[in-house]
Image (cartoon, rainbow, N blue to C red):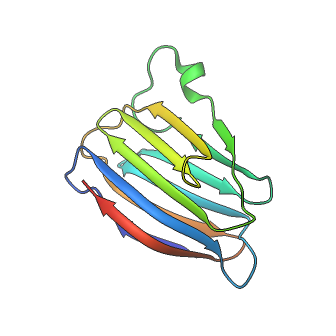
Amino acid sequence: MKLGVSACASQTCCSIELTMSPASGSWPDTISMSVRGGASYSTQLEFKPGSGRAFLDRARCGPIPKEGDAWKARRSVPCDYSKSVSVSIFLDVGSIEVFLNNGESTMTALLTAPRDATALKLTATGGQVSITNVKIGK
């Protein structure tokens, strides 16, 4: 299942809020969200209900600084999938902040995406996910 959403177009700062729930009673294997996408750049958020974790991957977020190995490290936090998952994302020119389930888990990272990298894409594999309460703001 693929959902295409245009967000943060021409904005250097924005917020994205949404709630994810299992469709038909079960979660998909993976829910992927690409933010600050464009050309060959994007920052990836990945939700893996089977592992009880959420991941942040900035390996393709933009030009990688010289200390690239640490920069490319994939981050993860626990995420409670026994209920709907609220996701709040705050983006600006050089950073991302992610809050899951009203701050139960958080991630933050610097980004190097170009200013014109503004695409947002949400994809579910191995099942379907219900997305509600979507709010995109400045």
Q: Is residue 93 above or below residue 36?
A: above
* Rendered residue at 80%/53% (across/down): 51
Name the outermost residue toward the bottom: 24
Please say whether residue 81 is visible from this viewpoint. Answer: yes
How many numbered marks does the figure carry? 0
Instruction: Please tell me in which quadrant of the rendered image residue 105 appears.
Output: top right
* Quadrant of image for the N terminus: bottom right
Horizontal side of residue 15 vs 26, given as left or right: left
Q: Where in the figure is residue 2, as x and y percent of width and height?
A: 52, 73
Please indicate, yes or no, whether residue 58 appears anywhere in the rendered image. Answer: no
Give coordinates of residue 20: x percent, y percent. Answer: 58, 68
Quadrant in the picture for residue 129: bottom right
Q: Could you say which is closer to the camera, residue 121 or residue 54?
A: 54
Work out whether 96 lies above or below 19. Answer: above
Point out the residue furthest to the top here: 66
- Residue at image position (61%, 68%) is 124
Task: Give whichever of 25, 60 is nearer the camera.
Answer: 25
Q: Nearer the viewer, residue 1 or 108?
A: 108
Q: Is residue 82 above or below residue 42?
A: below
| Residue drawn at the location 76% of the way across and 53% of the way down | 52
Residue 69 x, y percent position in the rendering:
60, 20
Going by the image, does 133 lie left or right of 75?
A: left
* Furthest residue toward left: 10
Left or right: residue 138 compared with residue 124: left
Question: Residue shown at 52%/57% (left/top)?
Answer: 87
